[in-house]
Amino acid sequence: MRKRLWISAVTLLVLVLLLIGTQKWMNSRSFQFYGGIVNHVSTDEKVVALTFDDGPSANVEQLLPLLAKYNAKGTFFVIGNELKTHMEDAKKIVEAGHQLGNHSYSHERILIKSHAYVQQEVELTNELIREAGYTGEITFRPPYGKKLFSLPHYLHDKGIKTIMWSLEPDTNYTTVEDKVTNAVNGVKPGSIILLHPMYDKTGDELKVIQGILDALSKQGYRFVTVNELIQLGSDK
């Protein structure tokens, strides 16, 4: 009887540890089971990549002039089904010299999914990104930053880089001032900053972006696309 209880307890402990480990792997910004993952780049140059998730939306009209004011290039990780209905906004992003990245077609968590599902989520969005006129390398950011086996395996097979982030001012902060302070205090050369301006109805997210652009510009930082940042790291 005691032996059975001991075996049951050990089995339960192993399952709990596996569950905890799986959750950490799923959410990790710096590890995945297949292929490379980028959450920052090692460089001595004062460069940073601003990345904007979701959309595109009508907020692109306000964001593009703001970036142009600071001679900043950004990376827009777009959702396929949003891109399909806001193609003109995506074309404006490309025409302004920014990078388009893939954020899946439906923005659902891609965890325990079939190969066919993953392929559709990635390839449909890639096709729309090309339709928008973007000709550069297409990178991928997992919805909600979550990935496990099938998604990294597919991306690795196709040679598509997984892009995460090193700073996310929106997490645990609510005011414009706190978000700007978090980003400015945490930044270092090669940082990748995640921002969410596409569905902002108050204008606060644009204020956050302006605050970051202004403060880091005064510190001598340049704002480059993710692809440019990766290239700078590989040139070392």
Image: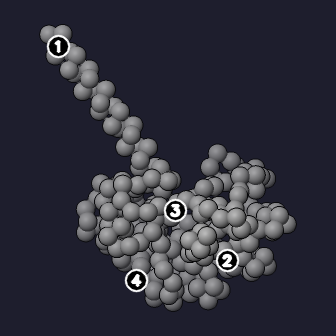
Q: Which residue is mark 4?
A: 127
Q: Earlier in the sequence, mark 2 or mark 4?
A: 2
Question: Mark 2 to mark 4: distance in Å?
Answer: 23 Å
Q: Is residue 134 left or right of residue 183?
A: left
Question: Mark 2 to mark 1: distance in Å?
Answer: 63 Å
**Above or below for 61 versus 143:** below
Q: Mark 2 and 3 residues: CB-CB less than 8 Å, in contact?
A: no
Q: Which residue is mark 3?
A: 38
- Where disc 2 sits, the SS reads loop
Q: Which of pointers 2 and 1 indicates the residue nearer the eye? A: 1
Residue at the image point whose x is 45% and y is 86% from the top: 130
Q: Is residue 16 left or right of residue 116?
A: right
Q: Which of pointers 4 and 3 indicates the residue nearer the eye? A: 3
Question: For mark 4, does the 10 Å Cα neighbourhood hold few (<14), some (14 to 19), or many (20 or more) residues?
Answer: few
- Where disc 1 sits, the SS reads helix
- Where disc 4 sits, the SS reads helix
**Amino acid of disc 1:** Lys
Q: Earlier in the sequence, mark 1 or mark 4?
A: 1
Q: Earlier in the sequence, mark 2 or mark 3?
A: 3
The answer to whether residue 55 is visible is: no
Q: Which residue is mark 2?
A: 73
Residue 216 placement (x, y as % from top left): 79, 64
Question: Mark 3 to mark 1: distance in Å?
Answer: 47 Å
Q: Which residue is mark 1?
A: 3
